[in-house]
Image (cartoon, grey):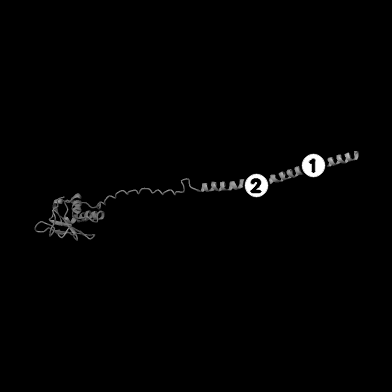
């Protein structure tokens, strides 16, 4: 009876020991699995964090490359053109002047200077411009004659002639056409006129 009890006690002790050993082994396995799983989880978290940071970093770089105005290229500003100051018309040769007491021939250089200066400033000058400019430079408008700029058929004349009868009964005659100017000094006609043919009334 005692032997049976002893065997029973040993059996129970062995079961208890085996149960404890099994529990200990299970606990150690779970602990090992937990300990082994911790680095794997940490590595997974780092990978997810890195994957999230890369797009964010690219977004920052791309945002920095885009102009703040949405990419629109600023329009080039052009300074408004400055208007040049009007060039004053050239003046006649200052070394020449009208000689009221001189002859027509002596006044021809000044007559030519006035007319050439006008042509340089206005190559399209006509009868009105020539006679008006001569008047402004001291020649007597009442002693002038000028031919029409337009012919009787309504076309521009090949040339315009203008004259000033001088005190010595000689005439200063100028002619301008096709960009060419010439002048001469001739005696007045028997009628007192300087030009032959049709002239226009000077009413300006």
Residue 114 point in image, percent of width and height: 22, 53
- Quarter location, residue 190: bottom left
Which badge, 1 or 2, is on the more N-terminal residue?
1
The one of 21 and 69 positioned closer to us in this rendering: 21
Residue 73 locus on image (x, y percent): 44, 49
Disc 1 target residue: 19
Label 1 Cα crowd, 10 Å radius (few <14 / some 14-19 / many 20+):
few
Distance of label 1 from label 2 (alpha carbons): 37 Å
Q: Which residue is mark 2?
A: 44
What percent of the width, then of the height, locates residue 130?
A: 20, 54
Disc 2: CA contacts within 10 A as few (<14), some (14-19) or many (>=20): few
Residue 159 placement (x, y as % from top left): 19, 60
The N terminus - image quarter? top right
Q: Find numbered disc 1 in the image and state the secondary structure of the residue it sits on.
A: helix
Cβ atoms at labels 1 and 2 below 8 Å apart? no
- Secondary structure category for the residue under label 2: helix
């Amino acid at each position: 009876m005692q032997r049976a009890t002893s065997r029973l006690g040993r059996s129970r002790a062995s079961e208890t020991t085996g149960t404890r050993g099994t529990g200990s082994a299970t606990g150690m396995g779970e602990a090992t699995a937990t300990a082994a799983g911790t680095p794997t989880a940490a590595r997974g978290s780092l990978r997810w964090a890195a994957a999230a940071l890369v797009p964010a970093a690219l977004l920052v770089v791309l945002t920095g490359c885009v102009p703040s105005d949405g990419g629109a290229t600023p329009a080039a500003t052009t300074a408004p053109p400055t208007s040049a100051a009007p060039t004053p018309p050239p003046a006649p040769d200052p070394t020449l002047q009208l000689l009221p007491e001189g002859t027509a021939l002596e006044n021809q250089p000044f007559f030519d200077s006035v007319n050439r200066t006008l042509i340089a400033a206005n190559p399209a000058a006509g009868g009105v411009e020539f006679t008006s400019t001569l008047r402004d430079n001291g020649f007597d408008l009442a002693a002038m004659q000028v031919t029409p700029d337009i012919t009787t058929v309504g076309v521009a004349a090949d040339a315009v002639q203008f004259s000033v009868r001088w005190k010595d009964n000689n005439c200063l005659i100028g002619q301008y056409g096709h960009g060419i100017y010439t002048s001469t000094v001739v005696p007045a006609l028997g009628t007192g006129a300087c030009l032959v043919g049709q002239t226009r009334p000077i009413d300006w």
